[in-house]
Amino acid sequence: MFVNDKMVLQLVALLKKFQIKKIVVSPGSRHNKLVNTLQADNYFKLYLVVDERSAAFFALGLIQESGEPVAVTCSSGTACMNYGSAIVEAFYQRLPLLVLSSDRVPELLNQCEDQMYDQASTFVNCTKYHCQLPVIDTPRDEWYCNRIINEALIELNHHGRGPVHINIPFAAHHGANYDVESLPDARQITLHQLPMVSSEWKTISARLKGKKVMVVWGQAVYPLKEVEKAENTFAEKYDVAVLTDKMSNCHAKNAIINTTITMSIMKENQAPALQPDVVISIGANYIFNNELKRYLKNGNAEHWQVGYEDKVCDPFHTLTDIFEMPETYFFNMLSENGESKTNGSYFAEWKAIADIPTLPQMQYCELYAITKLMSQLPANCDLQLANSQTIRMAHYIPIKESIRVNCNRGVNGIDGSMSTAVGFGADSNKPLFYITGELSFFYDMNSLSIRHLSNKTRILLINNQGGAVMYDQPRNTPVEGLPIYLAAGETKTAKGWVESLGFKYLSAKNKEEVDAGVNVLLDESINQPVLLEVFTNLSEDRYCIGDYIHSQDQRSFGEKVSGRLSRMFKK
């Protein structure tokens, strides 16, 4: 029988799945739960070595002879410290030594607790990976525990071999119940690396047969055209729906280019049928992150991570496979080794929702100004977007395929959006358009004094005296009734600052002035940077996206999530 402790059960189950069977044990009491559970399974071969210093070197001998990873486990306190010499030796010999050190719970550190010091950080500089397992009280704890054990065991043989340290906290080590009859079917995350033979690709492609396959295409996948070509062939063969956004700069044939709004207006009775069986993610972040997580939460899709990102990324909590290789190669291999073409309608069903009407006529607001500019942007120009509300609104507006779009969406902060835009345009001969709100603008205003600012810089600045996205108050709440310390309440204008730097400055407070100002922004004959500052109403701007969704006359996903949608657009 196994111990009734989910943390230990996850660890032992994954040791077994990763085929780590040799465990060197040094006596003690803090690791009773782990040792007794290992001993209860005949899969494992345990070796008893009293001295931890000798035990770890004994394990190195086992590794040298077998070529396999070997684990060592000890009690808490200085027992763990005694592994140091062997761990350093393993690091420089590049031997896959797995250190399983038992410990007390972290909140007791430096509280005069017996046999306790900072074990978790002891071997940081001489291990490939180190982690401390969480005590499992919630499903999120269990997912996290499973994920980091997978990460740790993968690293034993990832990009070369070497030691890994897992620190295991136990609140108590006596009085445990050993009443679990079998180990859980703990999720194993499998790492696939090149080279891979054809038979492996055929096995993987068979896992897609008859399945609904979704590709999530994130930011910064290069070289883009090669990946698009390979993905187009793959998508056609497997009837794939490719979810993208403007930051991805992806124009694959099976791309849903307005994923944010598509997911927002999806009807309740459509959602279950469109749940994928397999999600393949490439690239970095994407604007529809939260919407997709909420949507996939209701399904059981496998998640495959593709690329050279070098981190386990498990946003949907269903990661099963990591394909560490170029995206182009991955798609080509699955296309070449698939048995037959999938005859389905998965992409067509997504596309039917995505083909929404154009933006309706709307009242004067920030979305009106942004729409007016983006819908007229010239081909082959560059568009930089400030983060937060700006990048969200931009996804509701169709633009030409030849326009490159970028945004600092990696961590989703407002820092340096304009500095990035200035740097982007410094060595470019193309017109550069930058759209921002006043919070991001004034935060980074010094960037406009950089001497390398291009004369082809065109800035649309939305000034509503606050960040509309930060407020949840009812629609009829006046601006003066909003919490000023979130963002609102300060009246500033960019006029004096940008004019002192040689900008042509324009302002707008109604539709007619916006239309005229946008025409100036689009005038390529002007040989100086131009800024159009549009003054709008914060109270109305807080609802412009929600009103657009509502105007589609559907019970929207967005309506259920936000509960704040109301009409602003004219019928």
Image (cartoon, grey):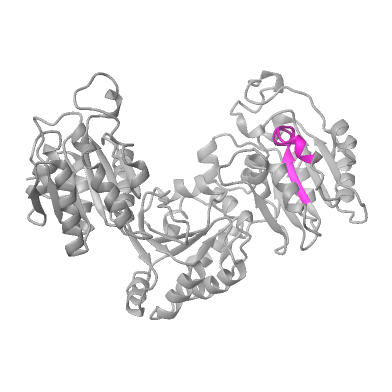
Residue at left offset 42%, top offset 57%: 275
Q: Is residue 64 left or right of residue 328?
A: left
Residue at left offset 79%, top offset 56%: 377
Q: Is residue 379 left or right of residue 197?
A: right
Q: Quadrant of residue 114?
A: top left
Find residue 421 and report its horizontal and vertical position in percent. 73, 48
Residue at left offset 68%, top offset 42%: 417
Q: Is residue 64 visible to us here? A: yes
Front one among 390 and 571: 390
Looking at the figure, which quarter contains the C terminus? top right
Front one among 236 and 445: 445
Find residue 354 and report its horizontal and vertical position in percent. 59, 58
Q: Is residue 502 left or right of residue 104?
A: right
Q: Main secondary structure of the magenta part?
A: helix
Residue at left offset 89%, top offset 56%: 524
Q: Is residue 360 visible to us here? A: no
Figure label count: 0
| On screen, residue 566 above or below 95 | above
Find residue 292 and report its horizontal and vertical position in percent. 48, 50
Task: State the extent of the magenta-drawn residues as a range.
Answer: 433-448
Q: Is residue 430 left or right of residue 311?
A: right
Find residue 184 and report its horizontal and vertical position in percent. 19, 50
Assess whether residue 18 is covered by the magenta stretch.
no
